[in-house]
Image: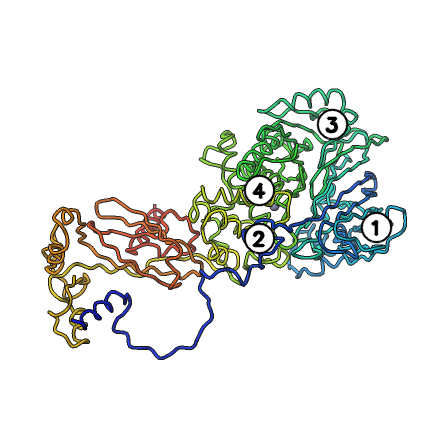
Amino acid sequence: MKIIKILCIALIVSSGNMFAQQEEQKSGKTNTNKFRQLYDEFSTPNMFRTGSGAPGPAYYQQQADYVIDIELDEKNKRIHGFETITYTNNSPDALNYLWIQLDQNRRAKDSKSPLIETSTITEAQIVSDFTKSFLKEKFDGGFNIEDVKDINGNTLAFTINRTMMRVELPETIQAGSKFSFSIKWSFNINNHITVKGRSGYEDFPDGNSNFVIAQFYPRMAVYNDVEGWQNSQFWGKGEFALPFGNFEVNITVPSDHILDGTGRLLNREEMYSREMMKRYKLAKKSYNEPVVIVNTEEAEKASKQASKYNKTWKLYAENVRDFAFATSRRYLLDMMAVKIGDRDVMAVSLYPKEGNPLWEKWSTRTVASTLLSYSRMTFDYPYHKAISVHAENLGMEYPMICFNRGRPNSDGTYTDYVKYRLISLIVHEVGHNFFPMIVNSDERQWTWMDEGLNVFLELIAEQDFGERYPEVLSPEHKRYPTRRGFPNQIIPYMGGDQDYISPIMSKGLNIHQLGNNAYAKPATALNILRETVMGRELFDYAFKEYANRWMFKHPTPEDFFRTMEDASAIDLDWYWRGWFYTTDWVDIGIKDVKKYYVSSKPNDYARSYAEQYKIPVDSLPPMVFLVEQNSYEFEPIMQEGELLDKSKPLKAYLMDNFTEAERNKIKQPKYFYTITFEKPGGLVMPLIVEYNYIDGTKEKVTYPAQTWRHNDNEITKAVASEKEILSIKVDPEQETADIDESNNAWPKEIIQSKFEKFKSKSKR
Ligand SMILES: [Zn+2]
């Protein structure tokens, strides 16, 4: 009896091959389990940033307040500026110098930025490209820093290292103290169509230009607990890291210009005509449609002759990380109000007549709709306005203002493609107000933290937009045709050439395929996380928590990763590891299906088992014997209710241990399966399986991702069923971005029949 007892335990415990011989001792190994915690990759929590992903009790951030006077020299396309920066050192550290960003220096004649790009001779080149590459004199850009002085007018020593300027201090700025200093500068504005860039001017045939101006002033770099000074050079890619502050900006432009920018317009009554003020007051009460404040006729009239006089627009912004503006005598202007919580926010558009009829119809409505959608997913938009400015070739964001491309043909016609791309771009750039303008991540280091989160919310906002304005949809579109973020859309990238794929957790400058890497993939990862892994309720709560914790602060990737776990009770280290730290892809399939029936007699397996332990077969403990369908031991298939008749030991056991009522309730499966699932793709994902039964019913089972924790390559599942399984499908609704579906079905014929269908279709 004792032997049998031991055997019984062995039988229950060993789920693998019980006849396996003791293997010889293998060498040791380190932990490569995909579910191990991310302690090696994450920074250690501390008093600045906690293990929960929230700002810690010692969290601080620096403040940079600006007073800036600038003058646009329209004729010479030059900007002259004078700024006073008051820098507040909230860190516990004493600072001996300050770093200031000189982004315009990327376009200086001696800039090293173009030199890091690789280039080659293409044997047939578009004339304009050839001219630009080899014939044209280089644009003379870059800041001319005239002087840097302290508040008493004493000159401060400074050193310019390309796009960064170090200002030496007369004395150390102690923790908690402030330092004020001023910079006088000028620079040539780039033509953003021919020279390119993230801002600049565009010329029009009537002799006038539109100016969309950003990175126009020397900007404080970020100093924080993570990087010290974030003074990594600006090479063109890898956007910006900026501290928050208050901006008082006075902008002098020709008096016939229409201008708007970051912040409250302090002298609107002085700058607007009476008629404009009247329309503006109407716009403030117009919640359903934009009110035109400057119309085509008025803009055309202003464009006929440039004014000789100047005027100064005064703007004031609190708690922003940057400042930008747009100015031209060619601009049309419209606005509408949108209720965010219990506040009114103004949605604003500035565009030349070339933008119509597209812009007057969609721009301001898109701004308003975007603010509503993003506010729902994060926090109420805290600023008083959001502006969309039309600038050809650009798509660029700043606090309260963004520059967007998308223009109809010269006869006013446009394709669906142009319409959707314009609306999507406005959603995207207005959305950047939330990430990174308010949830102020370090763009220089982590492009995905603003772009990825923003594209994820863009998808939601676009779907909302299609519902809010169904008339925007063409007849063939049931929903808004969002371009990025759905699982299937990322497959070509994730299944592509590994030489050109970088992990998401890479510095923006060094990434291959920036758009796919830092925009589409993280957005898709978050969308799948929301829809398939966490569910909307848990995801949305945690995402909102992240946005609110880090609103007007500087989060790091870990702060995001940790908060999403902390607020949801879902261990996601495996998910972040796979999607964000590797370039693995998803491929999960069915390798093998074995079908078993209950047999009345001891089978081969039982006989070998008895033999190994040298006991007679009939001395084995009571057992149920299962025989594979294809084996020679196979018996005729059971009929309904025959399970107990087939297995005498089972029947005896139930008679001895179960009451009659209990016996009447037992399930009587007839079909038994072992299904082997394989995972050729490195990414761990939930195993979503649809079982289709012979009676036409189906059942979807989602095995959590942790089902792969002991074997990353293949796992088996035993399934007992009263109905025969006709077919099995993995990821039936294509929600995991599985790059190879040829192994997703059993039997394989399903795929073939699809192929046959295709073949017969193409013959027609
Ligand atoms: Zn973006």
In this picture, residue 392 sits left or right of residue 758 = right
**Closer to us: 542 or 676:** 542
Q: Label 2 neighbourhood size at 10 Å, few (<14), some (14-19), many (20+)?
A: some
Choose mark 2 or mark 4, whichever is in front: 2
Q: Amino acid at mark 2?
A: Thr
Q: SS class of the residue under badge 1?
A: strand
Q: Which mark sits nearer the N-terminus, 2 or 1?
A: 2
Choose mark 3 or mark 4, whichever is in front: 4
Instruction: Give the quadrant of the N terminus.
Output: bottom left
Q: Which mark sits nearer the N-terminus, 4 or 1?
A: 1
Q: Label 3 neighbourhood size at 10 Å, few (<14), some (14-19), many (20+)?
A: some
Residue 241: percent from left, percent from top? 68, 50
Which of the four quarters of the rendered structure image does ligand 1 lie in?
top right
Q: SS class of the residue under badge 2?
A: loop
Relative to residue 332, is residue 623 depicted above or below? below
Residue hosting label 1? 144
In this picture, residue 700 sits left or right of residue 467 = left
Any mark on residue 50, and which? 2
Residue hosting label 4? 548
Q: Amino acid at mark 3?
A: Glu
The residues tagged by marks 4 and 1 sit, at their Cα atoms, a distance apart of: 40 Å
Q: Residue at x 17, y 49 (%)?
A: 666
Residue 203: percent from left, percent from top? 74, 39
Q: Label 1 neighbourhood size at 10 Å, few (<14), some (14-19), many (20+)?
A: some
Q: Which mark sits nearer the N-terminus, 2 or 3?
A: 2
Choose mark 4 or mark 1, whichever is in front: 4
> Do tag 4 and tag 1 residues touch (Cβ < 8 Å)?
no
Any mark on residue 109, and which? none
Q: Which mark sits nearer the N-terminus, 3 or 1?
A: 1
Choose mark 2 or mark 3, whichever is in front: 2
